[in-house]
């Protein structure tokens, strides 16, 4: 009989203003007897090896491993990138981070609902993306979008409430808009915008804790939803655009190009910020592709 200890729990102790510890207690209490290992996330060397060793131990019992991320989108992203083969495990997310947009796309709204789904074992195949060799589950943002994400993260580190932090940072971002030339190429489309400000690439429909940046995106359609934003002049027009993005009503606006694609190349005239499921980097070129049905995720 296969060993029932199939779950490897990966948690971020800083997620949700330390709410991860309370969520971890709930997970370990309710899943007692099913957990093979509990690992703390780290971007430092060694985490990927520890995760792969724990998964290998589960596989040796003849059981398919479950990797349970206790945290936000960033926690799941760290785990996803540490895996040798995402298709060989079943992923689950227990949402306690500042942004839980991938969990929301799966229909997992609370810690209790996440654990309920894990106990039932219901799952579905979903896509993930790859940008410059890094995997992402939910979204990528390039330009102003990522600069706002970085500012939001700094605000949270200073004690600003997680929920409103992205919105407050977006308001500040209205005054820091800097146009940049952006060129995009997909299999059937080429776009060049001299007055570009940001590009959002969504596997899931939301980012930033509820901003509907890619409102039509589906996790299992084998495509990425791309939105290219050109600048609009004037504080009130920019504020109106931000409100439309929050509500998912920006698609079809004259300054927004929207399309779907499985692959995408982006070149920017100068180095700009990029976020990958909330992790901040900087780029001038991004090569992006979808991996259809690349992972199995637990969902209600």
Image (cartoon, rainbow, N blue to C red):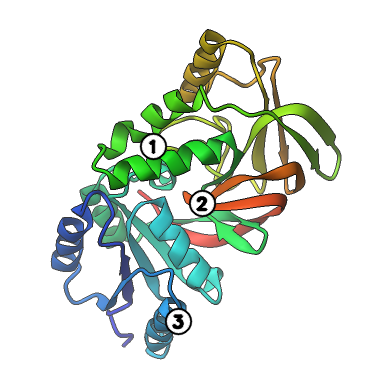
The answer to which image quadrant residue 143 occupies is top right
Q: Which mark is residue 259?
A: none
The answer to which image quadrant residue 49 occupies is bottom left
Which residue does the image show at 26% across and 37% down from the upper left? 160
Task: Give the secondary structure at mark 2.
Answer: strand
Question: Could you tell which of marks 2 and 3 lies nearer the N-terminus?
Answer: 3
Mark 1 sits on what residue? 209
Cα–Cα span, label 3 and label 1: 30 Å
Mark 2 sits on what residue? 280
Mark 3 sits on what residue? 52
Task: Give the secondary structure at mark 3.
Answer: helix
From this view, report whether residue 220 is shown above or below residue 56.
above
Closer to the camera, 230 or 80? 230
Which residue does the image show at 51% across and 48% down from the upper left? 138
In x, y percent, where is residue 222?
66, 49
Q: Is residue 282 left or right of residue 106?
A: right
């Amino acid at each position: 009989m296969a060993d029932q200890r199939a779950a490897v729990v990966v948690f971020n102790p800083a997620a949700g203003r330390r709410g991860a510890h309370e969520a971890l207690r709930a997970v370990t209490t309710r899943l007692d007897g099913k957990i093979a290992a509990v690992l703390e996330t780290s971007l430092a060397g060694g985490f990927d090896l520890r995760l792969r060793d724990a998964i290998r131990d589960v596989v040796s019992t003849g059981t398919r491993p479950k990797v349970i991320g206790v945290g936000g989108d960033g926690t799941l992203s760290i785990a996803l990138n540490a895996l040798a083969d995402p298709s060989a495990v079943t992923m689950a997310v227990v949402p306690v981070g500042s942004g839980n947009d991938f969990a929301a796309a799966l229909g997992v709204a609370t810690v209790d609902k996440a654990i309920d789904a894990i106990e039932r074992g219901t799952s579905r195949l979903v896509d993930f993306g790859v940008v410059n060799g890094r995997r992402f589950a939910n979204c990528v943002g390039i330009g102003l979008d990522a600069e706002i994400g970085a500012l939001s993260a700094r605000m949270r580190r200073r004690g600003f409430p997680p929920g409103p932090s992205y919105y407050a940072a977006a308001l500040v971002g209205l005054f820091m808009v800097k146009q940049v030339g952006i060129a995009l190429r997909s299999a059937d489309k080429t776009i060049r915008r001299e007055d570009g400000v940001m590009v959002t690439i969504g596997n899931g429909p939301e980012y930033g804790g509820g901003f509907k940046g890619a409102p039509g995106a589906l996790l299992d359609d084998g495509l990425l939803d791309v939105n290219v934003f050109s600048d609009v002049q004037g504080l009130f027009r920019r504020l109106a655009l931000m409100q439309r993005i929050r509500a998912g009503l920006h698609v079809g606006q004259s300054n927004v190009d929207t399309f779907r694609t499985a692959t995408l190349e982006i070149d920017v005239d100068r180095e700009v910020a990029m976020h990958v499921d909330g992790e901040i980097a900087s780029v001038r070129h991004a090569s992006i592709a979808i991996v259809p049905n690349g992972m199995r995720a637990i969902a209600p």
